[in-house]
Image: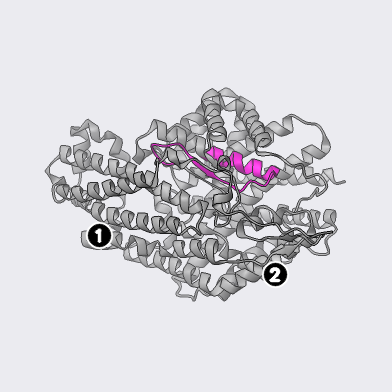
Amino acid sequence: MEKTVETRPTRSEVPVELTWDLRDLFASDEAWEAELAEIEKAAAEMAAYKGKLKEGASVLLACLQAQEQISMKLIKAWTFASLRQSADGTDPVNQANSSKLSAVRTMVSAALSFIDSEILRLPDGTVEAYIQQEAGLEPFRRSLHELLEQKRHRLSPETEEALAALGEVLEAPYHIFSMSKLTDMQFSPVEDEKGNELPVSFALFETRYEFSPDAELRKKAYDSFVHTLQQYKNTFAAVYATEVKKQVALSRLRGYESVTEMLLEPQKVSLEMYSNQLDIIVSELAPHMRRYARLKKRVLGLETVRFCDLKAPLDPHYHPSVSYEEASKMILDALQVMGPEYLQIMERGLTERWVDRSDNIGKSTGAFCSSPYGAHPYILITWQNTMRNTFTLAHELGHAGHFFLANKSQRIMNTRPSLYFIEAPSTLNELLLGQHMLAGTNESQMRRWIVLQLLATYYHNFVTHALEGEYQRRVYRLAEKGGALTAASLSEIKGSVLSDFWGDAVDLDEGARLTWMRQPHYYKGLYPYTYSAGLTASTTVAQMIREEGQPAVERWLDVLRAGGTMKPLELLRHAGVDMSNPEPIRKAVAYIGSLIDELERSFE
């Protein structure tokens, strides 16, 4: 039998209908270039307001309105360059445009840095008096008050301007990580049982091979993947150490007690809420997940459960293929409960090329939703015809629905809620999809399959990301004590986090300890733990929608439209969830335990 070689297409070889339509942002590269010139010109003109914000409410309003217009232009221009880079990071034009946009962002940040500094120098009470005098300032109230809350952590205007001018340099660790991961890292191909040669990439490993029912193929792909990671571990450690040291230095410069305090402040989250999320999940979820690992070992007939086996299908002979069109129908059917306005957003997203679903060389891994103000959202995913893809698509559509409604209802400065809340709308879509599917079948194997998909959602948020959050917590503790951040120490920390959680239920090899190299969220502050916070909230909301129906849906849609006008505790209380105490977390952990109970019963 002749061997076949599977190759990945270049971006130019991908059918256009599988890609997103960026013409909805800019009709051409030339139009984008022209917008950059307009942004630079507008930023330069802001100098006219420098030193004048003390002159009165009308001057402050004019300045903030001009800043708002620049922000609206900049977010669309940034999104265009960022999405092009995500679609193909190997394209020199995309690389150049990303660099060009980054330079413009840094210039704008430096040009506008005087605004915050001058507002903070105004005598106490002046800002509130201005708001009373000028009704046009009311939409800016939240951002102005949040700025004043940061007053004790602000540096001199000259220092703030210098830091803003260094913005591109300060963001370098993330860009170096992304560039290395997407363009420089090459993985050896592997052979399947028929001798066919299969390519390995970050995207393919994380979307296909980790979920493969073929234990031998899974092992080969994992070994290929880890082999390449090992070649880059010292470089990636140096890059991540730079990011961590930057955060430590900034927190000390600004007078925070810790990096954690600094990074939680913009999230409007207390240290207790943050600690509850990590402490309860790491300790109380562990026994359930060890049961899950041991069940996987027994059912799959494994001598030991390797780290690469944790996402292997428990029912490998029942692995139905799901086309994008079939997945779209399933999602729309499940979201009927959300009402016509929300459903229309979902339909547009699925049919109007909001989704980029191809696999191609240079494409960013994972999945995300980008929601630029003044345009529709864009979703990136690598479609593999799996049920897991279906849940991931529903997840990203949850982000799209959230920000479509928030952008429509709020001014740009009031659209984005705390990171603590961000993952609630997305995970709610996944839970509604799972509930709908479970309600529609009594067939035992299908029910087991759906339970496995729901467990995958909780695994992603409550295991993968919560353990990443615990890893971050330990890394920052070490860094603040002056400890060395090397490939060896980072791997040791990651290994200890995994070992504390999995115990002896999983064989934690070198590849497991190197998973700190895989996550871009480490470069985005305290982001990973918020995945579990969002899913904790959505677990409760999904239950309320099931029990109450329309009233719960209406409360939730109000919360989505509110955008960033409320703090996360207020948003969730409006939806009916109180995250000020640990009870919702414990209920979510117990629900995961009940899913594993059902799974165990299905194999008896």
Mark 2 element type = loop
- List x then y, in percent, for residue 540: 60, 37
Write the residue at 82% across / 39% down.
445
Write the residue at 65% across / 68% down.
226
Check residue 375 for magenta coloring. Answer: yes
Q: Foreground: 256 or 321?
A: 321
Check residue 122 for magenta coloring. Answer: no
Write the residue at 28% across / 49% down.
37
In contact (CB < 8 Å): disc 2 and disc 1: no
Residue 151 makes an appearance in the image = no
Residue at mark 2 to residue at mark 1: CA–CA distance: 46 Å
Amino acid type shown at disc 1: Glu
- List x then y, in percent, for residue 557: 50, 30
Q: Foreground: 467 or 272?
A: 467
Q: Is residue 322 left or right of residue 460?
A: right
- List x then y, in percent, for residue 564: 40, 39
Q: Is residue 267 left or right of residue 210?
A: left
Q: Disc 2 marks which residue?
A: 509
How many tags in the picture?
Answer: 2
> Which numbered marker is on residue 161?
1
> Which numbered marker is on residue 284?
none
Q: Earlier in the sequence, mark 2 or mark 1?
A: 1
Looking at the picture, does residue 198 appear above or below residue 456? below
Range of residues picked out in magenta: 371-399
Residue 396 makes an appearance in the image = yes
- Characterize the local packing of mark 2: few (<14), some (14-19) or many (20 or more) Cα atoms within 10 angstroms: few
Q: Foreground: 320 or 18?
A: 18
Within the image, what quadrant is residue 335 found in? top right
